[in-house]
Image (cartoon, grey):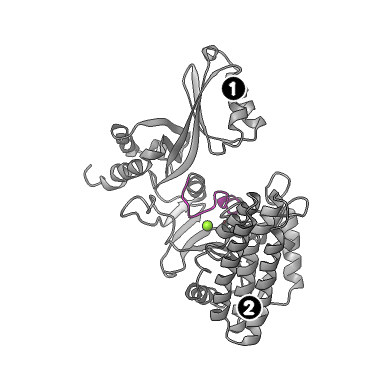
């Protein structure tokens, strides 16, 4: 069986919903994972923010605006008045629930309850739409099988057992529809897999059912070799290894949620990235195979903070790095890049929630300098570190002031840290040196 995940834009308009129906009705049995309709999760986050800011009028207004969108979609998608009514009632109940939440105190749980509504609406509407079109589709409620444990990792044992159970209990179907993103936490409360987490849902499900393939359908024709928003003439990469794709997803390629690759890699299930608007194009196939050496793709990740920790005593001393890392561990802050000299270490973090406390502790034994507004530029490809053409990337040093370089951490990744103001220029220069100047060699 295959698992197909469709993103927000794929279910964001009547036209796209109809294309998704065409794509999934090829006669094969499958599980389809859906995101919320595009714009919905952002609107739900906004509602939660207004409740947090105690601006209840603004929250109610946002709920009203969002509900109007759904009224229009229901009217266009469903043909007979009875079905319109049935779906309308379900969606009305959700908006009434959201309205009732505006009088509650803001907590993380309240946020989780609010943002989970988008996927509940999209999957309900889509299943009813498929039924209207004569497709034997059934809903598998994610909250009955998708669960994370106390460390926020998928509870694979629980998921496997419960998914199997509800499939067995459901009436036979050709297509099972389920919600991406949403899950229960270890205590049974509504939680989620973080923004963009529907991709992750798809590979978690793919892993537990040992799917033949997981397909992630979006509005772009695969993972590109550079960021198409900033660089002209980028192209989709046909094949990536799990390691290459994981590095790219983690270091900024927006197309995949960072943790998506892991469950697929563990279970060795190929992941195919496909474009809903161009279903025939090959897309990107992520598998355990490697195709070619050298730099394959460049991606950038923003909102990085660089911290330089300097200590005279680091000279010939051991135990300094341990002391530094222990502080980051204590504050559950993961480190992305790291470079060292004999008297200082520079590292980067992307979660600065506990930065003030971390600095306070570091300053007890070192001098600390912090640079905000940094971007990691990551160059990925099998064996990039050893490839004879990799040196070309370093030409960028003549154009851009680079704050850190991480080379050799893995064979597949070289990372540069630059000021975010220089990000676009760095991506463009690198594109020229690495991908375009090949003929000039
Ligand atoms: N709807 C959620 C979001 O917008 C999850 C997803 O789309 O993957 O973040
Ligand atoms: Mg996404």
Give how far across and how far down residue 79 sits, in percent: 57, 86
Q: Which label sits on residue 362?
A: 1
259 in magenta: yes
From the viewer's perspective, is residue 248 above or below residue 160?
above
Q: Is residue 322 visible?
A: no
From the viewer's perspective, is residue 417 above or below residue 79?
above
Q: Which label sits on residue 175?
A: none
Quadrant into which the C terminus falls = top left
Q: Residue at x 73, y 48 (%)?
A: 149
Q: Main secondary structure of the magenta part?
A: loop
327 in magenta: no
* Side of 312 relative to 222 (left or right): right
Q: Can you tell me whether the CB of the residue at mark 2 lies under 8 Å from the nearest atom of ligand 1?
A: no
Q: Are marks 1 and 2 in contact (CB under 8 Å)?
A: no
User: Of the residues under marks 1 and 2, which one precedes in the sequence?
Assistant: 2
Choose between 256 and 285: the one closer to the eye. 256
Q: Which residues are magenta?
A: 252-265
Q: Quadrant of residue 139?
A: bottom right
* Side of 279 relative to 323 (left or right): left
Choose between 50 and 415: the one closer to the eye. 50
- Residue at which label 2 appears: 128
Q: Residue at x 57, y 36 (%)?
A: 352
Mark 2 residue crowding within 10 angstroms, few (<14) / some (14–19) / many (20+): many
Quadrant into which the N terminus falls = bottom right
Mark 1 element type: helix
Give how far across and how far down residue 282 sits, in percent: 42, 64
Choose between 53 and 178: the one closer to the eye. 53
Give how far across and how far down residue 426 sits, in percent: 34, 40
């Amino acid at each position: 069986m295959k698992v197909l995940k469709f993103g927000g834009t794929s279910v964001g308009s009547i036209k796209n919903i109809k294309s998704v129906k065409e794509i999934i009705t090829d006669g094969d049995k499958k599980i389809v994972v859906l995101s919320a309709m595009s714009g919905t999760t952002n609107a739900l986050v906004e509602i939660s923010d207004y409740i947090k800011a105690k601006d209840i009028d603004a929250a109610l207004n946002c709920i009203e605006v969002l509900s109007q969108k759904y009224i229009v979609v229901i009217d266009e998608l469903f043909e007979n008045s009875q079905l319109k009514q049935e779906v309308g009632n379900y969606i009305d109940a959700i908006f009434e629930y959201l309205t009732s939440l505006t009088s509650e105190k803001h907590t993380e749980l309240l946020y989780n309850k609010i943002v989970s509504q988008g996927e509940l609406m999209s999957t309900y509407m889509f299943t009813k739409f498929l039924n209207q079109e004569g497709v034997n589709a059934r809903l598998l409620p994610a909250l009955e099988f998708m669960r994370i444990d106390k460390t926020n990792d998928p509870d694979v044992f629980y998921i496997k057992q419960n998914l199997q159970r509800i499939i067995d209990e459901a009436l036979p179907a050709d297509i099972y529809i389920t919600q991406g993103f949403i899950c229960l936490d270890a205590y049974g409360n509504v939680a989620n897999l973080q923004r963009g987490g529907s991709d992750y849902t798809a590979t978690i499900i793919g892993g537990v059912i040992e799917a033949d393939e997981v397909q992630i359908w979006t509005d772009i024709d695969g993972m590109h070799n550079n960021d198409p928003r900033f660089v002209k003439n980028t192209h989709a990469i046909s094949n990536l290894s799990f390691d290459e794709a994981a590095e790219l997803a983690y270091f900024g390629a927006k197309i995949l949620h960072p943790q998506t690759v892991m469950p697929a890699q563990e279970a060795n299930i190929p992941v195919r990235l496909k474009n809903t608007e161009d279903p025939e194009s090959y897309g990107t196939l992520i598998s355990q195979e490697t195709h070619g050496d050298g730099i394959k793709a460049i991606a950038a990740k923003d909102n990085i903070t660089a911290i330089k920790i300097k200590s005279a005593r680091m000279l010939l001393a051991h135990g300094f790095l341990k002391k530094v890392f222990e502080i980051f561990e204590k504050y559950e802050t993961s480190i992305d890049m790291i470079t060292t000299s004999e008297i200082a270490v520079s590292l980067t973090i992307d979660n600065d929630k506990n930065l003030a406390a971390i600095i306070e502790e570091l300053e007890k034994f070192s001098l600390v300098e912090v640079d905000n507004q940094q971007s990691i530029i990551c160059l990925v490809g099998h064996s990039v570190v050893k490839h004879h053409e990799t040196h070309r990337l370093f030409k960028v040093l003549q154009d851009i002031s680079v704050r850190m370089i991480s080379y050799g951490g893995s064979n597949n990744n070289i990372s540069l840290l630059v000021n975010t103001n220089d990000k676009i220029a760095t991506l463009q220069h690198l594109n020229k040196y690495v991908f375009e100047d090949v003929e000039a060699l």
